[in-house]
Image (cartoon, rainbow, N blue to C red):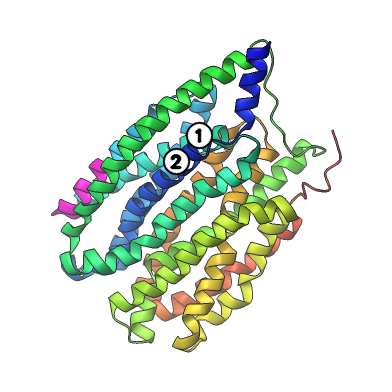
Amino acid sequence: MAATAASLKRASDPVYPVMFAIGGCHLLNDAISAVVPAMYPILQAENGYSYFQLGLITFVLQMLSSVMQPVVGIISDKKPRPWMLPAAMALAFIGVLLLAFSPEYWMLLVAAMFLGLGSAIFHPEGSRVAFLAGGAKRGMSQSILQVGGNSGQALAPVITALILIPLGQAGAAWFLILAAAGVLILSRVARWTSDRLKEEDAAAKGKKRQIAGISGLTPGKVKAGIALLLIVIFVRSFYVVNMQGYYVFHLTGEYGLTVRQAQYFIFMFLALGAAGTFFGGPFADRYGRKRIIAASALIPIPLAVALPHLPIWLVAPVLGIIGFVLMSSFSVSVVYAQELVPGKIGTMAGLTVGFAFGMGAIASVAIGAFMDLAGVYTTMIIISLLPILGLVSLYLPDERRAAPA
């Protein structure tokens, strides 16, 4: 009995070394994936690829990740497999190797497949580790996990400016070091996860584990809440993909910036987006998850509409504000979905993050194809109107008003 109580006590205590380790590996994973859109100007200059061809590379990566993430989540909810985490980073290693040294376009697509599969495995399994390590502070743990990923994305433009522009496509080989480090760290995390799962199984023997969720909601309201949440994620994903991969062409074409200069503007958007991801979790704990999700969807609307028309001296601060506010709901969305459907940690993480990847995949191709037809400026105007769809966030179920069960 005393041993069981001690196990339950340990389960409620946050394990910060593991939280930061999984967040750090998320940084490595997403920095590697973000190199693909960051390499667009390099691949176009060296190989003459069209915007559609560039977008198709990201489409393969993100669509494969999108389809597989819920599958991985469902499988791991039934039987967790901690070894999948280092395996995910090993797949990313192979993808980077191909990305750096692929002489043909089809090989870039194969590289994207390896990167996409590795990312598909990492995200739901990483969310499970964050949930286990967070204990009573799972909101904070999820924020650490997600800010790691967004920080990795934010670093990609800077690395592009410092490494890929001077070295070209082969410069991507430097990311092999990150992938190798990720394999080593995740091997240690996997051992900790295996031990923690054994402890929890022993503590919960003969009992059904109870996971707190949003009570007082009918199945219909839960489904509606998930649907509305996915619309918010759709808007965020389309907008972020445009900023990551295509906004650089607007900056170079309309403002006369060099590719290197433009990358620092993209970094401003992504870096403050990472900061927003971190602060979004604590804000949601204090003010409510629905309120933070709605605020992140509504506040950027006027700024996004104005952005294509601003003078260059206003672009950087507005980009930073949009990035911070828009991404503040990233980790909150995952926890909100997990609480809408309690007991399905991996499945809900796979659904929300996987859907974001899927929308990003579609966006990468759709935006590239439209840009080939209509031009860069017209595309930026159309994308600037997309955040208006975020108004649907006002109708999300409010967890603070849910009736007690």
Looking at the rendered structure, the kind of residue marked 1 is Val
Residue placed at 22% from the left, 69% from the top?
165
Disc number for residue 129? 1
Residue positioned 29% across, 76% down in the render = 259
Q: Is residue 326 above or below residue 57?
A: below
**What is the total number of numbered labels drawn onto the structure image?**
2
Decide: is 76 above or below 255: above
| Mark 2 secondary-structure assignment | helix
Name the amino acid type tagged 2.
Answer: Ile
Q: Which residue is mark 2?
A: 22
Residue 53 visible from this viewpoint: yes
Quadrant that contains the C terminus: top right
**How many other residues sit within 10 Å of disc 2, few (<14), some (14-19) or many (≥20)?**
many
Q: Position of residue 287 (x, y in %)?
A: 74, 56
Separation (CA) of disc 1 from disc 2: 7 Å
Residue 176 at x, y percent in the picture: 23, 47
Are the two marked residues, 1 and 2, in contact with CB atoms closer than 8 angstroms? Answer: yes
Q: Quadrant of residue 155?
A: bottom left
At mark 1, the secondary structure is helix
Q: Main secondary structure of the magenta part?
A: helix
Along the viewing direction, whichever of 264 and 366 lies nearer the viewer: 264
Residue 151 % position (x, y): 43, 57
Could you tell me which quadrant the N terminus lies in? top right
Name the residue at the right extreme. 403
State the extent of the magenta-drawn residues as a range. 93-106
For this view, does 395 lie left or right of residue 193?
A: right
Percent coordinates x, y for residue 261 in the rendering? 32, 78
